[in-house]
Amino acid sequence: MSIRPFRDIKRRKTKKIKVGKVEIGGDSPISVQSMTNTLTTDIDATIKQIDELTKAGADIVRVSCPDQSSSLSLKKILKYINVPIVADIHFHYKRAIEAANSGANCLRINPGNIGSKQKVIEILKAAKDNNCSIRIGVNAGSLEKSILDKYKEPCPEALVESAINNIKFLEDEDFFNFKISVKSSDVFLATKAYRALSKVCNYPLHLGITEAGGLTSGSIKSSIGMGILLMEGIGDTIRVSLSANPIEEVKIGYEILKSLNLRHKGVNIISCPSCARQGFSVIDTVKILEEKLAHIKEPITLSIIGCVVNGPGEASQTQIGLTGGGKGDHMIYLSGLPHHKIPSDKIIDEVVSLVENKSQELKSN
């Protein structure tokens, strides 16, 4: 049993490409990305952070290659990781070529700051030779001069025109293994640009609200912007950009997808904000459970409700439920039905045990 969705989202049909072993577009699950913030030349630190992001659930990890030492470091890094790597390239086309030759699975390039078309052609050749996909990363903060001269300022039309121009250029060079983003830190600008672009091309779209801010404000902006687009069926892979630990980007990314019933991974906790009716400390309980259940990968729905006003109703829709009762006597629900009672001091251990047992059951089926 799981939460019944109010409606299913009909995703826009796009081409399917691969970033390493991960498929993007078509009927593939919407993938979650993040980016390292270590110095890429610090190979041990970068490997450690990539491993942490992978354990958190990142499907793809982006690594910045600002100089030759960084792009060449990828060759060593890739020996010790098990997730596709996107090399983030700006300004210097040779970094892209070096990254492709070092084994990067995808190159993120912004044609607006790469330079001449001949340089982009050389990047495309290196990508073809190494079976490396590309993300055309159009950004409101770094549009081509000719586009800015035409529109005077970043706007949806400017981002889309830049994207279309670059799509045509890659197609003319017989390169089709790419995805696109049209990012802005402005939610309205970004959503309008993605909507417009989705109507005129069928390449997979990488969603993001760039430079969204800190953990709280950035999560909210990203959830609004990407949530609107995802509800309209737009988007094939996402990255939540936060001025925070990159692991938080992965967590928020999955929460966005889980809330829209687009992807299920880990425990989905439905909990109340708590009030004077609560039979136990809901806020503290949820915080502890989030930490203790972070290792669960199987999709499991868990309701933690402080009293009987909404508790039984929410529990009827989840695989495991807890409803607060009077005098420290709380009801555990399994598969939507009342099962047994537990005292307040047993809540954490009991719920963790039930979830872990459910996880093992799902693994074996």
Image (cartoon, helix red, strand yellow):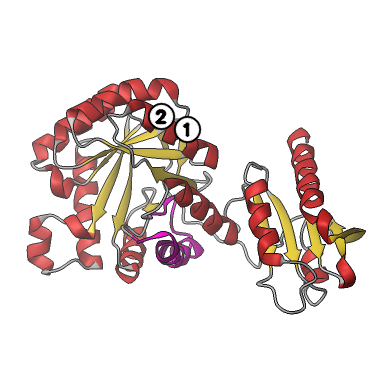
Would residue 306 appear left or right of 273 to someone viewing this image? right
- The residue beneath circle 2 is 47
Is 14 displayed left or right of 172 in the figure?
right
Q: Amino acid at mark 1?
A: Asp
Above-or-below relation of 96 to 164? above
Residue 85 spot, x, y in % from top left: 38, 33
Which of these two is toward me, 124 or 142? 142
- Which residue is pictured at 40% across the width and 20% down the height? 79
Q: Secondary structure at mark 2?
A: helix
Decide: few, some or many residues near mark 1? Use Cα within 10 Å; few <14, some 14-19, many ≥20: some
Quadrant for residue 361, please give it.
top right
**Residue on which the image places disc 1:** 51
Give, as a single range, the part of the protein colored magenta: 212-241
Contact flag, marks 2 and 1 (Cβ < 8 Å): yes
Q: Is residue 126 visible?
A: no
Q: Quadrant of the N terminus?
A: bottom right
Where residue 175 sits, quadrant-wise, is top left
Which residue is rendered at x = 83% and y = 54% of the image?
346
Q: CA distance from mark 2 to mark 1?
A: 6 Å
